[in-house]
Image (tube, rainbow, N blue to C red):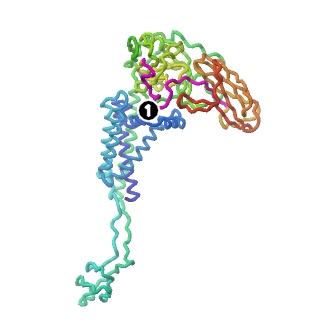
Amino acid sequence: MSTTSRRYAALAGITAAAVAIGIAEPVAVLTGPRSAPLVAVGGVIVDAVPESLKQLAIDLFGTADKIALLVGTAVLLGGFAALFGVLAVRRLALGLAGIAAFGAIGVAAALTRSGADLADALPSVVGAGLGALVLWLFIGGPFELDPWSWSPPTPTAGPVSSAGPVSPAGPVSPAGPVSPAGPVSPVGPGSSADPGSPAESVPVTPAGPTAAAEPVGPAEVDPESRRRFLTGSGVLLGTAVVAGLGGRWLAGRRGVSAAREAIRLPAPVAPAPAVPAGADLSLTQLAPYVTPNFGFYRIDTALVVPQVDPDTWRLRIHGRVGRERTYSYADLLARPLVERYVTLACVSNEVGGDLIGNALWLGVPLRELLDEVEPDDDADQVVGRSVDGWTCGTPTAALRDGRDALLAVGMNGEPLPVEHGFPVRVVVPGLYGYVSACKWVTELELTRFADFDAYWVPRGWSPQGPIKTQSRIDTPRKRNRLTAGPVTVAGVAWAQHRGIRRVEVRVDDGPWQEAALAPTVSVDTWVQWSWRWDATPGEHRLQVRATDATGETQTERTQDVVPDGATGWHTVTVTVR
């Protein structure tokens, strides 16, 4: 197959796949965005890939890891689609089988997601059907390229006598037989062997090396056929893009943003303490004391944000309890609400990382709800289950020991953002999010750690995840070029539910210098710190460490985030001129 034909065939396969994925998106508006094949397959990948690859994606892309996964999945699909197009030129059934296989994978992925039903197979079925039709249009239908040159035409030998074939016995002379193998029989009236027709004789080209076959290139593609092929592919690719983006837009219109905007949260009966003056140092590059909603980190396994209608939302608390209870959203808003500042941190946060944020949360104390269901004495774990099936396991004791563990409905003075768990999520001070911060929560099941492993535990993470004492240098940043003289070194430190007693900084492995701590609302939030450094010219290495209120200083020992959070001292190298 010529290179040109192979490229056209690959384009046909990619166009077919694009139509399949693009058309599936508006169909998924009817069945739910999680049923779209790209999202469904991406969800299976998230669940199945080794933990090291997931962590690599977070390290490389941060909170954009989901977009990177979807783009990577689409690129991989495009590669296979190009191959199916090439195979279809040789045999159409091979290409159609490839499209059908991808459709089957989409169906299987959609049907195995939590809460799926048979309707979730529809986007993949419709998409695969239209993709197969498009492939046929380009390979054997009205958009077919003319010709699909699978191989060059058969080469020919040089000119031969019009009289017919030449004997293989040897070369023939116009004057008669000279071959030692014997005379060559005349082969027709115009043969040079017929003395009666000398005027009609035709020279015969010798069959030796001088008559070698001349290769002939692939046939030229008909220009009108090429225009028809490229126009068709362009129109269909454009249609696929419009359908895909339009489907996503329609899914958003059918979402819960309007319902969220209509909610008016009641005032808390127990407002949060006011942020003390000086808690936010307001320095360039230093993270603000309160993280705005748009800047709050988001790490979860949901490739599309669940859209949960607050009117139909229910929370079921069950399992090892004296009596099972179910609550509606209205039930929660009718209860006395409390407001608290709590800093949340992701266990995947590297030393010095930014997967951490502090916000003002409004919600119902979880200990009150647990008291109402009367947990069994041996129920040491509360499993939070999200609407998409994700689970986390929280120690029951942490929800009943007096800390401000909340079933949150508000964040920074407004209803929870949809991407941060609307309508209801769990917030627990002092625990990493993977064991506590269940977003879009619909169930709380009282069980035992010995009986159930939540989502991340079989994937190599610790069943329990108390937050470790950590600190970070926000300013100056790595490789900043500074001027000799006074320089303010500043950052944040955290040890939720214990609090920070001291932060120290050192330069070039010199003695530790105590930094000044800004005031803070409570032990459940991070604290800003600063230290004045008389910088001298040259390259310098800054390090920071914190000591929590129990007297434990963060360790120098470097540990990866797996299985229960990273450790080590944040280090920044700067140049002073």
* Front residue of this view, candidates 77 and 225: 77
Q: With 450 as the anchor, is 485 left or right in this view?
A: right
Q: Does residue 265 sit above or below 222 in this rendering?
A: above
Magenta segment's dominant SS is: loop
Regarding residue 532, the answer to whether it shows in the image is yes
User: Which quadrant does the C terminus fall into?
Assistant: top right
**Quick check: is 447 in the magenta stretch?**
yes
Q: Position of residue 249 (x, y in %)?
A: 41, 32
Q: Any magenta on residue 85?
A: no
Position above or below: 435 against 4: above
Residue 391, image x, y percentages: 44, 25
Mark yes or no: residue 261 visible.
no
Could you tell whether 330 is left or right of 479 in the image? left
Element type at mark 1: loop
Please rate how many residues cluster around mark 1, counting C-alpha atoms within 10 Å: few if below 14, some from 14 to 19, many from 20: some
**Residue 304 sits in quarter:** top left
- Looking at this view, is 467 or 305 the one in front? 467
